[in-house]
Image (tube, helix red, strand yellow):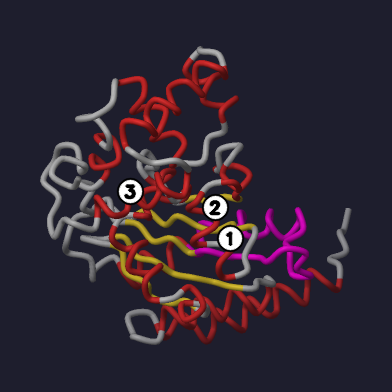
Amino acid sequence: MSRTISPTALAMVDRLSQGLAYLVPKIGSEEFPHLLVEVIKEFIPADEMTLILFEDKPVFLASEKNEQIGKQSIDMYLAGAYLLDPFYRASVELTQSQFFTYDELVPDGFRQSEFYRQYLVKIGLEDECGYLIIFPGGQFLHLSIGHGQGSASRLTLSEQQLLATLTPLIDVLCQQHWGEQLSNPLNRQLDQALANFGSSKLTDREGTVIRMVLQGYSTSAIAEKLFISPGTVRVHLRNSYRKLDIGSQVDLHNLFMGALMQFEHYEGGDPLEGFF
């Protein structure tokens, strides 16, 4: 039985084919990262697309809204706020390249977190999806596709499925371009700064609670994961805030970032030690 391909599908395949014909010869050139973004935007709508390479340290390769984020926010992200990014968190245990939507990654309270307010709301984005391209040396590339609140460019389910289907293609293009350029292993040392944050001043359970709050977990989600009551979570949080001399999630996020940004090279332990 013959099958009829819809005009919409044919048009999309045609745009992709033309984009690849233009992109593939640019593999290895300085133009490739920006062209990759442009080719994807030709057939998938987006309000913002960003490429961040995580090698020795994270580097923005392409972003249309860096000026709106502001230098301070970018510096904070690169200094360690990326540790709270759900895509970075997903990369920790990922062994092969994959496409994700935010709904697959974010904790239930993420949209009330300070990270969300500082790095997505500030540039007018509400949602995000994208690729995590994993390289053999453990380095990875985050190709982010962002959408604003009420945006007409929000992806449909079929568009999300298309992006997921394209994962092997995006992966091989990125492997070809960056694979031989990457020499430094991914520096995961700073991961321990998050794991150890507050350990010198808080009990183990209090430290676990505040780290989960930083990552965007709600009180009910923390309670469920730790097998305690929401009231007990609130008690731990209140005690932690008192010991850290802070009063809100904003203060907690600022304290975390302030502690991280004091280091040129973090070598272990609680980043709060010596900070107060």
Q: Which secondary structure, mark 1?
A: loop
Q: Residue at x 76, y 53 (%)?
A: 157
Q: Residue at x 13, y 41 (%)?
A: 268
**Any magenta on residue 22?**
no
- Residue ID for mark 1: 166
Foreground residue among 216 and 178: 216
Tell which circle, 3 or 1, labels the residue nearer the N-terminal end.
1
- Residue ID for mark 3: 255
* Whole-number angstrom distance, CA of label 3 to CA of label 2: 32 Å
| Up-down relation of residue 240 to residue 101 (above or below) | above
- Residue ID for mark 2: 99
Q: Which region of the structure is painted magenta?
A: 144-170
Q: Residue at x 55, y 14 (%)?
A: 229
**Which one is closest to the eye, mark 3 or mark 1?**
3
Is residue 58 rendered to the left or right of residue 62? left
Is residue 67 rendered to the left or right of residue 274? right
Crowding at dot 2, Cα within 10 Å, few <14 / some 14-19 / many 20+, comes out as: many
Q: Position of residue 37 (x, y in %)?
A: 52, 76
Is residue 13 rendered to the left or right of residue 167? right
